[in-house]
Amino acid sequence: MISVEQIKAARGLLEWTQDDLADAAILSRPAINNLERRLTKPHQDTMARIQNAFEKEGIEFIDGGLRHRKQIFSVNVFEGENALIQLMEDIVGTLGKNGGEVLVSGVDERQFVRYGQGKLDGYMKEFQEKNIDDKLLLKEGDTYFIEPVEHYRWVSEEIFTQVPYMVYGDKYAIILWDPEIKITLIENQQIAESYRQQFYLHWNTAKIPQI
């Protein structure tokens, strides 16, 4: 359960008044005031509402503190034969709790099968179980599908990129297949959102595959 100190710090980071927090958490201002002054012992439901209100605004609570997702910038690199498996595991770890969406641009499923070590069907099943949806952009005319056709859209050769990227949660991944697979994974809300918008710009004008 989050602490009173974290609540005050989160309000400060968002520049929220007690009224702002009360409105966002659907609580009364006196309830927030009494909580912060430690005049009442908070109910678990009250703290859950407060935490949820902050998390909707991008606040992440960590041991002894908090941070804002917009301020996070981290880079990880996966290389070698297990790189794609590491990426799939990260997708499940990132979205597995609440579900979500994986957007993939520049798809050549032959490469995904090549590096998937025979485990892709298992991950697709796990995606389904955890309410993880995916959308994939591939080059017009390519009919090599490993998922239901409705997950795909065709883009023109001019738009199609040979360097695939993925967007999920606050993460953006770039995949280089050759000479050895290398995946650069960036965690930053603003970067992820920028590429998410770019993806949907192409998705909304792409063609439904004809097979």
Image (cartoon, helix red, strand yellow):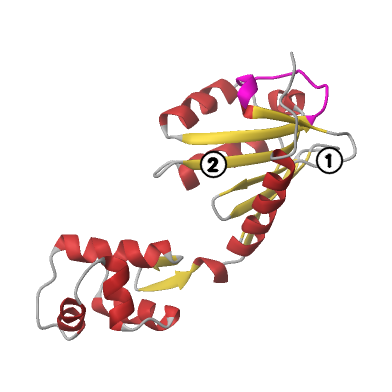
Left or right of 13 on screen, residue 38: left
Residue extending furthest left?
40
Left or right of 95 on screen, residue 7: left
Residue at 70% x, 39% y is 203
Can you tell which quarter of the image residue 91 is in?
A: top right
Give the percent coordinates (x, y) of residue 126. 46, 29
Amino acid carrying label 2: it is Glu
33 is higher (above) or lower (below) than 179: below
Residue extending furthest bottom?
37
Task: Give the secondary structure at mark 1.
Answer: loop
> Was residue 148 drawn as part of the magenta stretch in this picture?
yes
Give the percent coordinates (x, y) of residue 43. 13, 65
The disc label shown at residue 101, or none: 2
Q: Quadrant of the C terminus?
A: top right
**Disc 2 residue crowd, few under 14, some 14–19, many 20+, Cα 10 Å:** some
**Disc 1 residue crowd, few under 14, some 14–19, many 20+, Cα 10 Å:** some
Find the magenta span and give its range: 139-150
Give the percent coordinates (x, y) of residue 194. 68, 58
Q: Which of marks 2 and 1 is nearer the N terminus?
A: 2
Residue at 67% x, 45% y is 200
Amino acid carrying label 1: it is Thr
The disc label shown at residue 161, or none: 1
Task: Give the secondary structure at mark 2.
Answer: strand
Give the percent coordinates (x, y) of residue 145. 69, 19
Q: Do the residues labelled 2 and 1 touch (CB within 8 Å)?
A: no
Q: Alpha-carbon distance for marks 2 and 1? A: 21 Å
